[in-house]
Image (cartoon, coloured by chain):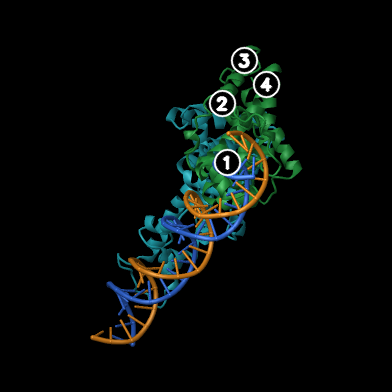
Chain colours: A green, B cyan, C blue, D orange
DNA sequence: CAAGCCGGTAACTAAACAGTTACTTGATGG
DNA sequence: CCATCAAGTAACTGTTTAGTTACCGGCTTG
């Protein structure tokens, strides 16, 4: 959950240093980050409480401010980590190694299942957009992270067009936004939707039906 | 924006009463509701400030608590009004009067354009879902409001299936969720999306392209 | 083994906050 | 023309909150 190499890197002066079980800076840091992820995801930026994060992490505010500066910087770190996680997992898919149709289907399935397993990621996106990407815009770590996705998707679409299975107007950004839209809305808005339509959207049967629906819609929209 | 008939209704005792320009309960009430809509949409439930709402409405907290009880009740009223507005406009569409294909296309266009013109509605949905529909669930005014939509949509789909233009597996809730997904995600997440993909999604050309994309995807997913 | 450094604790502070109370103003009806 | 009542004002209160400060204790190094 956190790169242990960091302490070794900065400590040329103290090479033999191994921390005791009681004092474990890396673990405390990781615990704060994880607790903050949950707190921000559940309550948003305005609703999140610094005291609550410290308590959840099994530590106190002093450590939180020591490691992360202030509430806003901690929030940005949480957001950055969330993006890094999904883009890293996405990259490991290697959608270009299959047939174009399978590749797109795989990406749709992966995205849906990732969203399903990481509700905190969806919440964080919602919070960040409520604030018009105020903090994400300040991030300097995320410039290169996302271009790979569009590049690889673009290649798969081109391949499909050459093979005559995809329509010529299929656009990589549009395809990704379609996949993400269908997953994001269903999950992030499940509570109001279940309430107003009087149907529990989150049962296994309904989740399964929507997963198939996403793949169906995505492919139907680009197939010749 | 507010029904003026209410004051006349409760005042049999004081029939000649016409308020002066200075004292205008209905207007104050409406101003608070509108100010609250903006404040909650911009800052969420946790970030919204009661003082700020009073100031935006050109009044003070005393009036706000007098008319709406407390912050939570005011928030619920805002949310209810937002739902009533979209469902009322939707009803006026009468999608059943056209051909099935045109009817679905009209619903998709309407939904997209309504979302585009009412960003505060999308924000409120996001906030309410962050809190797992905590307040919406308490609402007693919204039970009947949404069933009409699914009923009408269901009829149009049936008609299309009989005419042989729609596939047999097309489901009314799925069709509506598809339309809403594509509009909601693009707009509500425009800030993070524009940031990470380095492309401004909100230019007239891009908005127009996405509008056409929504209609295309929706129809492609149900056409035989 | 002593100095000091670093991970960690807990009590504190100033500001912001939701909600309340005491008061003012002005129109109306007896 | 005065008593009443509702609309509206503004200062106040107790609590919560982000951020700080003074302190503790054990490990490492000279």
Picture quadrant where residue B159 is located: top right
| Cα–Cα gap, marks 2 and 1 | 17 Å
- Foreground pick, A188 / B95: A188
x%, y% of residue B211? 51, 32
Q: Is A23 displayed left or right of B121 in the figure?
A: right
Q: Which tag is nearer the camera, tag 2 or tag 3?
A: 2
SS type, badge 1: helix
Marked residue nearer the N-terminal end (2 or 1): 1
For the residues bearing labels 4 and 3, Cβ distance under 8 angstroms: no
Q: In the image, is residue B154 above or below residue A171?
A: below
Q: Is the same chain shared between marks 2 and 4?
A: yes
Kindly identify which numbered label has been placed on residue A95.
Answer: 4
SS type, badge 3: helix
Marked residue nearer the N-terminal end (4 or 1): 4
Picture quadrant where residue B170 is located: top right
The extreme right residue here reads A205
Q: Is the same chain shared between marks 1 and 3?
A: yes
Q: In the image, is residue B24 above or below residue A158?
A: below
Q: Quadrant of the C terminus of chain A?
A: top right
Q: In the image, is residue C25 above or below residue A10?
A: below
Q: Residues within 10 Å of mark 1 (few under 14, many from 20)?
A: many
Q: Which tag is nearer the camera, tag 1 or tag 3?
A: 1
Q: Residue under circle 3?
A: A161
What chain does mark 1 sit on?
A: A
Q: Residue under circle 2?
A: A146
Q: Is the same chain shared between marks 2 and 3?
A: yes
């Amino acid at each position: 959950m956190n790169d242990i190499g960091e302490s070794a890197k900065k400590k040329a002066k103290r090479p033999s240093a191994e921390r005791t079980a009681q004092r474990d800076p890396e673990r405390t840091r990781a615990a704060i980050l994880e607790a903050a992820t949950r707190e921000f995801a559940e309550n948003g930026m305005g609703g999140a409480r610094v005291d609550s994060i410290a308590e959840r992490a099994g530590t106190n505010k002093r450590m939180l401010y020591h490691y992360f500066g202030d509430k806003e910087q901690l929030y940005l770190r949480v957001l950055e980590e969330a993006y890094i996680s999904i883009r890293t997992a996405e990259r490991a898919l290697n959608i270009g190694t299959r047939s174009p149709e399978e590749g797109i289907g795989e990406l749709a399935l992966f995205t849906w299942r990732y969203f399903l397993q990481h509700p905190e990621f969806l919440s964080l996106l919602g919070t960040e957009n409520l604030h018009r990407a105020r903090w994400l815009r300040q991030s300097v770590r995320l410039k290169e992270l996302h271009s790979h996705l569009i590049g690889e998707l673009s290649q798969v679409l081109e391949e499909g067009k050459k093979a005559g299975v995809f329509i010529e107007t299929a656009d990589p950004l549009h395809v990704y936004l379609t996949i993400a839209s269908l997953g994001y809305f269903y999950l992030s808005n499940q509570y109001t939707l279940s309430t107003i339509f009087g149907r529990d959207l989150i049962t296994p049967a309904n989740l399964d039906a929507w997963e198939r629906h996403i793949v169906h819609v995505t492919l139907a929209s680009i197939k010749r």
